[in-house]
Image (cartoon, rainbow, N blue to C red):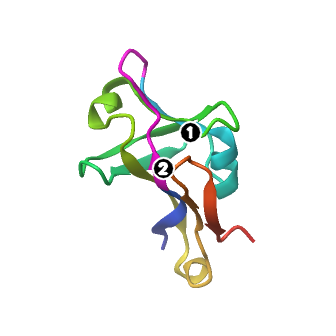
Amino acid sequence: MQMQILKSKIHRATLTECELEYVGSLSIDGDLMDAVGMLPHEKILVVNQTNGERLETYAIEAERGTGRFCLNGAAARRGEPGDMVTIMSFALISPEEAETFAPAVAVLNSDNTINTLKGTD
């Protein structure tokens, strides 16, 4: 049996842009993706704490060191620059692996820099 479990999470990110005229997805600063082990094109769940919207899309790597978080395409209608969001990815693992697994979690400051980072040992 396999179970779906939280693999990585970027918490309290601030949207910097929303670009309606784009194919789709969420652009995320590549350094922040690396920090939690999130991969380009990985399926993600985005939760907007500001307006309560939730959406599934995929991650694309934005320029490193920019703190950029941009909702693209139709997803751009689910938020506005300045909204606070949490981005999560999940993995299928065995119940035995789940007993000791710890997700990588980055909690960000208001400027989209890492405040705390856990689970990346």
Residue 80 position within the rendered picture, expressed as x and y whole percent measured from the top left = 33, 34
Question: Is label 1 in a helix, a strand or a loop?
Answer: strand
Indicate whether 19 appears above or below 1.
above
Residue appearing at x 24%, y 52% in the figure: 52
**Image disc number at residue 13:** 2
Question: Is label 2 in a helix, a strand or a loop?
Answer: strand
Instruction: Find the magenta span and give its range.
Output: 12-23
Q: Disc 1 residue type?
A: Ile
Residue appearing at x 37%, y 23% in the figure: 73
Cα–Cα gap, marks 2 and 1: 10 Å
Instruction: Check the image and name the residue furthest to the front.
Output: 110
Which of the 4 image quarters holds residue 103? bottom right
Is 47 displayed left or right of 70 in the figure?
A: left
Residue appearing at x 70%, y 36% in the figure: 64
Residue 17 position within the rendered picture, expressed as x and y whole percent measured from the top left = 44, 29
Residue appearing at x 63%, y 44% in the figure: 39
Q: Which of 54 and 2 is in front in this view?
A: 54
Q: Nearer the viewer, residue 55 or 20?
A: 20
Which of the 4 image quarters holds residue 35? bottom right
Q: Nearer the viewer, residue 60 or 11?
A: 11
Q: Mark 1 points at which residue?
A: 28
Residue 121 position within the rendered picture, expressed as x and y whole percent measured from the top left = 75, 71
